[in-house]
Amino acid sequence: MTPEVRIGGGVVSRLPEVLGQARRVLVVHGRRSFRAGAAAALVDGLATDVRSYAGVRPNPDLRQVREAVALAREYRPDAVVGIGGGSAMDVAKCVAVLAGCADDPRSYLLGSSPIPERRSCRLIQIPTIAGSGSELTCFATVYAGHRKLSLDHPSARADHVLIDPDLASTVPTPVAAASALDAMGQAVESAWAVAATPESRDLAVQALETLTPVLGAATSRGTFTEPGLRTELARGAALAGAAINISRTTAAHALSYPLTARYGIAHGVAVGLHLRWLIGHNSAATAADTRHPDGPEALRRIIDDSQRICREGAGVPLETMIDRLLAMHGLDGLQIPRRQWHEDLSGGRAANNPRVVSHEDVLRNAGGTTRLMHGSRHS
Ligand SMILES: [Fe+2]
């Protein structure tokens, strides 16, 4: 399923048209950002029966998914509308996919119950924070305690996506910076992924070419509030989302999840902290330890190309751009906490990294203190 995507200022006003004949609409969103933004007025004005699940929190957990799915199973909506950041998109996917199923959501997220090919309702995604690209992917991340669960199924992809940069005008700078790190990480990781295809690599290059001038301008101004920047950031993030929907992400994402689940570090920040050292690590791949199907030289060309795009777009290499976005998020000189990384390196995302990464590689490259940061929990 390929979503119908509309991007631009004011496109969110097309929601009634996109909903068409839907009689019962379930809106899935968070609390504060939703009420502060223009989306709330739009939903209030819908001339159809609407119910809301307003319990989405950053880094959503199984409890929220169970609550939202229970509401959907009782209400039987014709359409589910996700409004918010990547967390709202992810919960909306779970709700739309599992509304017509009978088992506990946990069993589908663990892969023990099969997910039906068809949904019982339509899915419309309206991202209000540009970055995750989640509105264009068919997978979602849900936490159960410190454990990461996943929904990964073609039916989790939306029917319609409305990307309206005006909705992002109230997003605080630290949140915008974390989301920008996620978008940039996803573009870089998609380009070098083992599972990349010519189509996904083309999307990843377009994403980087779109994102880097925006990131250069935003980090030098210290804000993402300029409407032109927001539009291009939304466009670049959506391209990166479309790229990883094909290629999936790699080790930076695999290693980011425990930082989010255990230490509450914002997802994009956790990705950026690992991406910074993985750029050099992957560039140094040899014939003996590369996983890239085209070999280490081709991998280096891909990474050099990403660096060139960043220099041309933003005037600095990728690592410097990551540092600037981390500083914009409010973190300077952060060290990655020391932990046992073996389990984080045993999954599919780590295997999709173009060079083998060991526990020792992470400790050597990512430092390792237990100095943690405060106030960095954003989605
Ligand atoms: Fe991500």
Image: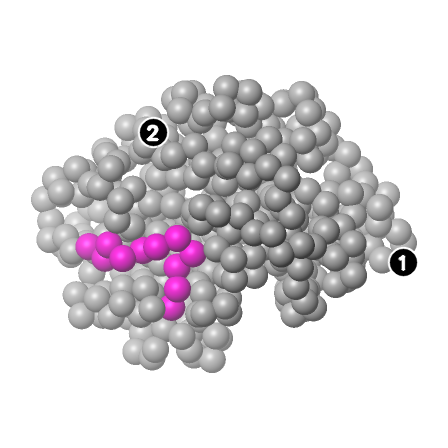
Going by the picture, which residue comes out furthest to the right? 287
Rendered location of residue 360, percent (x, y):
78, 61
Q: Which mark is residue 288?
A: 1
Q: Is residue 196 above or below residue 16?
A: below
Residue tagged 2: 169
Q: Quick one: SS at disc 2?
A: helix
Question: Mark 2 or mark 1: which comes first in sequence?
Answer: 2
> How many residues crowd around disc 1 within 10 Å: few (fewer than 14), some, or many (20 or more)?
few
Rendered location of residue 48, percent (x, y):
11, 49
Tell me the amino acid under the disc marked 1.
Ala
Which of labels 2 and 1 is toward the front?
2
User: Considering depth in this image, is 273 or 189 the residue closer to the camera?
Assistant: 273
Residue at left offset 48%, top offset 75%: 111
**Is residue 59 one of those drawn in magenta?**
yes
**Is residue 363 one of those drawn in magenta?**
no
Rendered location of residue 67, percent (x, y):
27, 67
Q: Is residue 38 above or below residue 147?
A: above
User: Considering depth in this image, is 121 or 12 the residue closer to the camera?
Assistant: 12
Tell me the amino acid under the disc marked 2.
Ser
Q: Which mark is residue 69?
A: none
Say left or right for 60 vs 24.
right
Residues tagged 2 and 1 counted as in contact (Cβ below 8 A): no
User: Considering depth in this image, is 337 or 194 the residue closer to the camera?
Assistant: 337
User: In which quarter of the view is residue 318 placed?
Assistant: top right
Observer able to see residue 201: no
Rendered location of residue 20, percent (x, y):
20, 46
Looking at the rendering, the stretch of residues picked out in magenta corresponds to 52-62
Report if the beta carbon of the residue with label 1 is closer than 8 angstroms to ligand 1: no
Residue at left offset 53%, top offset 48%: 373
